Image (cartoon, rainbow, N blue to C red):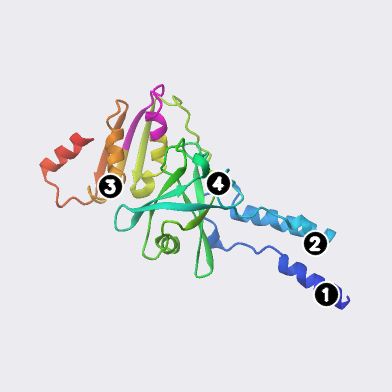
Amino acid sequence: MGEREEDDEEAWLQLRPVEPLPSQCCGAGCSPCVFDLYQQDLARWEAARASKDRSLLGGKESQSCPSKLSPETFLAFRISAMDKLTKDTYRVRFALPRNSQLGLRPGQHLILRGIIDDLEIQRAYTPISPANAEGYFEVLIKCYQTGLMSRYVESWRAGDTAFWRGPFGGFFYKPNQYGELLMLAAGTGLAPMVPILHSITDNADDETFITLVGCFKTFEGIYLKAFLQEQARFWNVRIFFVLSQFPHLTGADFVNSEDSL
């Protein structure tokens, strides 16, 4: 093999896709998974190498101000607001261009990509904004002391950019598909329930009855409490809170809290 051929071989090896680390998989069963995308990129690289045609390597790049989501490509979204709901939980709003809609159906989620200490990580989050929200979408994120993604999220400021891909999820809610839905949620596990609640109560023709049981540590720590209280005013929505700690609540407080729901 001549020197030029060796240089060409080295150049091709440098272009070879890098296999993802386990931390880059969110574990949510997404299709395509980050490992599926690696296999696609590897097959593209092998075909390009065999034909010695680097133009075949051209893939989709991350875009800013996207107009359409992609399950395969991370797209950049600008953070327009970041509200701290509790000491460790944030509601983050991302801007969409030209009052466009995100395009998710109730029950679907997105994958967030973060980089900490040169390590790429990915996690799944469900937007809590209505499916028909225009110009923005919101997510509910809880941060943990030892969490890598938590460190990334806590570094965010309004005006920063974060990268998402999707949508994912095989559960699609259809109006009046069921007579009654029982929703069980603990902490930020409330997030997937919110867009379905929005969908049902925003549709006067949807007569699905909903019972939501939300589990939280304290009454003060209930996420989206004002929203839940508003939802509970609908004739077909019942909401119950299960608390693991309530040292400051008296019997009267429980009566008042139940009346507010």
How far, Cα to Cα, is label 1 from label 4? 40 Å
**Quadrant into which the C terminus falls:** top left
| Marking on residue 256 | none
Q: What residue sits 30% from the left and 38% below the top? A: 228
* Separation (CA) of disc 3 from disc 4: 28 Å
Q: Residue furthest front?
A: 98
What is the spatial separation of the Cα atoms under label 3 and label 1, in whole angstroms?
63 Å
Q: Secondary structure at mark 2?
A: helix
Which labelled disc corresponds to residue 166? 4
Mark earlier in primary sequence (1, 4): 1
Bounds of the magenta segment: 198-212
Of 63 and 18, the residue lying toward us: 63
- The magenta stretch spans residue 4: no
Mark drawn on residue 6: 1
Q: Secondary structure at mark 4?
A: strand
Tell me residue 135's x, y (percent).
47, 42
Looking at the image, residue 199 sits to the left or right of residue 68; the answer is left
Between 135 and 258, the residue placed more toward the observer is: 135
The label number, if any, that marks residue 49 in the structure image: 2
Looking at marks 2 and 3 on the same chain, the residue that comes earlier in the sequence is marked by: 2
Amino acid type indicated by mark 4: Gly
Q: Is residue 208 magenta?
A: yes
